[in-house]
Amino acid sequence: MSTVEKQLDDLKAEIAAEIPNDISVSDVTYEGPELVIYTRDPKKFAQNGDLIRTLAGKLRKRITVRPDPDVLARPTDAEAQIRAIIPDEAGVTDLDFHADTGEVVIEAQKPGMVIGRHGSTLREITQKIGWTPEVVRTPPIESATVSNVRNFLKQEREDRREILERVGRQIHREELSDEQWVRISTLGCCREVGRASFILSTAETRILIDCGDKPGAEDEVPYLQAPEANPLNSIDAVVLTHAHLDHSALIPLLFKYGYDGPIYCTEPTRDLMGLLTLDYLDVAAKEGRTPPYESEMVREALKHTIPLEYGDVTDIAPDVKLTLHNAGHILGSAVSHFHIGDGLYNVAFSGDIHYEDTRLFNGAVNEFPRVETLVMESTYGGRNDYQTDQADSEQKLMEVIQETYDRDGKVLIPAFAVGRSQEIMLVIEEAMREGKIPEMPVHLDGMIWEATAIHTTYPEYLRDDLRDRIFHENENPFLSSQFNHIDGGEDERRDVTDDGPSIILSTSGMVTGGPIMSWLEHLGPDPDTTMVFVGYQAQGTLGRRIQSGWDEIPMNGRGGRSDTLSLDLSVETVDGFSGHSGRQGLVDYVRTMNPRPEKVLCVHGDESSAQDLSSALYHKFDMRTFAPKNLETFRFR
Amino acid sequence: MSTVEKQLDDLKAEIAAEIPNDISVSDVTYEGPELVIYTRDPKKFAQNGDLIRTLAGKLRKRITVRPDPDVLARPTDAEAQIRAIIPDEAGVTDLDFHADTGEVVIEAQKPGMVIGRHGSTLREITQKIGWTPEVVRTPPIESATVSNVRNFLKQEREDRREILERVGRQIHREELSDEQWVRISTLGCCREVGRASFILSTAETRILIDCGDKPGAEDEVPYLQAPEANPLNSIDAVVLTHAHLDHSALIPLLFKYGYDGPIYCTEPTRDLMGLLTLDYLDVAAKEGRTPPYESEMVREALKHTIPLEYGDVTDIAPDVKLTLHNAGHILGSAVSHFHIGDGLYNVAFSGDIHYEDTRLFNGAVNEFPRVETLVMESTYGGRNDYQTDQADSEQKLMEVIQETYDRDGKVLIPAFAVGRSQEIMLVIEEAMREGKIPEMPVHLDGMIWEATAIHTTYPEYLRDDLRDRIFHENENPFLSSQFNHIDGGEDERRDVTDDGPSIILSTSGMVTGGPIMSWLEHLGPDPDTTMVFVGYQAQGTLGRRIQSGWDEIPMNGRGGRSDTLSLDLSVETVDGFSGHSGRQGLVDYVRTMNPRPEKVLCVHGDESSAQDLSSALYHKFDMRTFAPKNLETFRFR
Ligand SMILES: [Zn+2]
Ligand SMILES: [Zn+2]
Ligand SMILES: [Zn+2]
Ligand SMILES: [Zn+2]
Ligand SMILES: [Zn+2]
């Protein structure tokens, strides 16, 4: 009998001893990090309100209880009963019964009303029908990404269960090594921005954290060929801090290279990763580059993803517990905390962070039970990288909009689909609602609409007061009537061009392709239009050129003609909407961190930024700080 | 056609173009780092004195010329001619003809007389008989180790040639990677003494430097399971700095684990490694431990060894050239200098060093064409690790010997077989020759005699004035008549005990076993005997206990009785004969190093010694210094 088998037998006995005699345990298995208990008495389990929580505490495991298949009500009967229990206002849009696991997935517009106070409605459902309900939100704005991902996972349910069982056994395997050490190897994003990738390793376990590309340097990928990462199938787990491509682009590639294990991230990160990596393949194809992997690999990645919620302490290896915390950077972004061994060591990877609250997100979490080493981003860690206060930036943006409106012009804002667009939407929505600027249409072009739809699907990940507004006051600013999805292509763009004043948010954020190119053609020659840059424009991009004053730009006209376009529109730059903390925010993050780490590795910043930040933290806080290079390995224990 | 094949074809054409028309080139192959040219005209090649050197310079390769087998004189004729050419005083003791390579190995008591001025006698031999002569020294004292190694290699000649051809092709393979980086990974001996082991790696090549054990901690072996070292058969080359077991003990284990490549070291290091690792297996067996490998693996290691001379610049990988330099520590010990890429980077590994001249060796070399990083031993790097001046130590030792002699007693010196014994022998021999102490027998017991025999076989590796004395004045101090090899076992020891005053040098150096245990039984109760400690006594050894005053020691009597032995002999300690530089010597090594390196990694010392030295070098010389931990990886380019 394998040790995992033996372990499960022991657990089964322990559970049987813990629970009342009249509740049976027919089977106990692992699915990913969870312990799944099958019972012929799901209703009694549900009646004993705290039983599961008590068990979880005793066994120190995450526990799911499922009914034995032969005690389930028939789906047609069950459906009728579920609809009777759940109030109509919950807006149930789909019910999906999975006889193999006894789960019923309930998709509803208001998941809270399906769950009930402290889960009371859910318990009532189980007591009546035996099935275990699982609730997901119906996206308030239809999101192709969310529904594609959900449909795909539904369809791959069996494969997925196999994966989860395999991963579960891996996680709960017996520890083989009695060596004790903790190492971090840098595979990318050291003294540079881009290709984020790290290996966290112990004698027992290897974890890959992020695996991104380097924008503008397609051949500079993470050093996956480094011995510390090889063979790839020896890696136990991949953790993705957030969906930006400089962290996620090459995650699907891992599966092409033989990785077959889990990816841990938040649910929105999973969906955004799907959206952004597919777009990444698209762009590569359009630019005539050979994409490094096929879309099939994106599906593999999705299938292997185990979503975690902020704050859940999760076993991901025999000697490693992972907890994700809000990072304030983009939807679902996570500071990833690793607890290693039984109190041996603790490491936090910041991923990308915004320390201060923004309109969209709470500031990044920096409280942990313990943490000895922090691996920290340094994008704006340079000694002069102070940022404009966002209130001032908003003020300036409103002035630009007002002036443009006054001359009957349009405001054209190139923006990244994920994060900054939604922040700007919130700024504009509030200003219009409060009468600070006149009401006018706000057109969303490119992936922005889709990204916004994903945001509305996961309000739990938004800033607390925004979330409250959405939940309690039923006031979702993203659903405001002025927002218009450009889904009519060139015809609609021409109509908007001919219409009166409006605001247009369009990808790509650095004017390197996408619908913004059309908008430039339409509005570039219009002196009443103002183009406003609200995000960083990298060296070599068209955005950077326009920002610095170019007024003749090359355009690929229809039919392959190569034309020049004269720009007559005004150009403005409004800083201060970054998803990254500036120098002050980064220092504050460490200053107020609790507990304060002993060591900080400054990464994800160009050489001078990383070194400046490293030196500043050392002098301010008398801690050991480093600005590693790629391909180095640090040992902590 | 493989790229190596193509390369050899090109070389053949290039050589043909360079040499006179009347000299043919029948074949060109690689054997290890050497390019071997086969010719049907070996005599003409030999006549053109500088031809080989010119070719070597042009092709930037080490070149050996061999006759085509069918132009060789018959061995019997050839032997007669060789004996006619070489003067009788050369003392030829063996001639060995290898028809497959056209080489004749000439073993002689005076190799210099076989070689002749600037190689003139060798050239004369080739001109007469076609065979390529190779000269080795007949050990002046018969050495079982040297003759076993030579016989073994003779017997494995065919295997060895295959290995060399394979290695040659590996070394001269085409470079695959266009990445440029240089890393060092620490697999052992960081913040500790023992289990020396490092990986030096580039995108193209991996080199393992040393692979030793940790005395007194048999389970703490180098971290060979670290990914940086795996798979072991991906390692291109092993470099062994010297034969001490904390550097060499686990080299044979590599072959058990699948390594099948070359080992580079000096010739005496090869022989001493054979001696010491076989003894290591013996001791393990005697102590009832399971040896980590079988003696067969020692033979594998010997078979894969490619000996290098100090100063030879040798290609060991497409992008790495190795040069060994005298380290002053033990016979054959080498500072190992790596030149990487075409001027990309230079790293020197000190191995263990003695910076100042000793009686046995010149001080460690610290001049290099270039060197950016030095990996340096720190055994006595602590702030208080200053050593007694050797002249004072010698003075004190002579006083102890004189006093003991005066009371008709014996001097018993526990000593390590390799290095310190020979240094003490030289001190005693001089003192007697100069009449500073009376002449008396000096008995050598345990492996000391054998180790001394190996020293006499390689006088080129000894200090220059000692070498000169041996070569020119025909005065080999190791052959002095007072030295007596204890080869008659207990009978002889009893005779010595009953005889008058004498000096006894015996292993083991820390009184942890070996014949010193017998000597203790014989002389321990004798108040006229003086036991003199001349080397470091580790915590927990019997030597340390006696040194600190114990006068009742447990002994395993004959027939398994466990007895107690009362010690009545005097005990003295004479410091200052270390094979390691003290703190001052280590600092001086760096101070006078030319050029001075940018970075120094302080290793091979306990935590405080390594950190003290690192800090001292940083403050004195304003260089980047580190005291790495095991399992770290540093990137330099
Ligand atoms: Zn990001
Ligand atoms: Zn990033
Ligand atoms: Zn799979
Ligand atoms: Zn040594
Ligand atoms: Zn050593």
Image (cartoon, coloured by chain):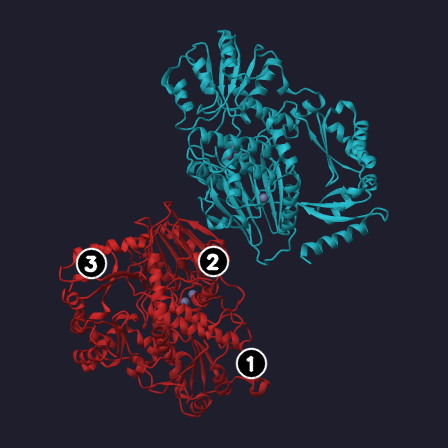
Chain colours: A cyan, B red
**Position of residue A238 measured from the top left corner of the image (x, y, whole percent):** 56, 43
- The chain ID associated with circle 3 is B
A508 versus B392 height, above or below: above
The residue carrying pointer 2 sits among few (fewer than 14), some (14 to 19) or many (20 or more) residues within 10 Å by Cα, namely many
The dot on residue B187 is 2
Q: Quadrant of ligand 5?
A: bottom left
Observer-nearest residue: A119 or A389? Answer: A119
The dot on residue B553 is 1
Observer-nearest residue: B213 or B270? Answer: B270
Tell me, yes or no, if residue B319 can be seen here.
no
Q: Where does label 3 land, which residue? A: B55
Measured Cα–Cα span from mark 3 to mark 1: 66 Å
Horizontal placement of B94 versus A204: left or right? Answer: left
Q: Quadrant of the N terminus of chain A?
A: bottom right
- The chain ID associated with circle 2 is B
Q: Secondary structure at mark 2?
A: strand
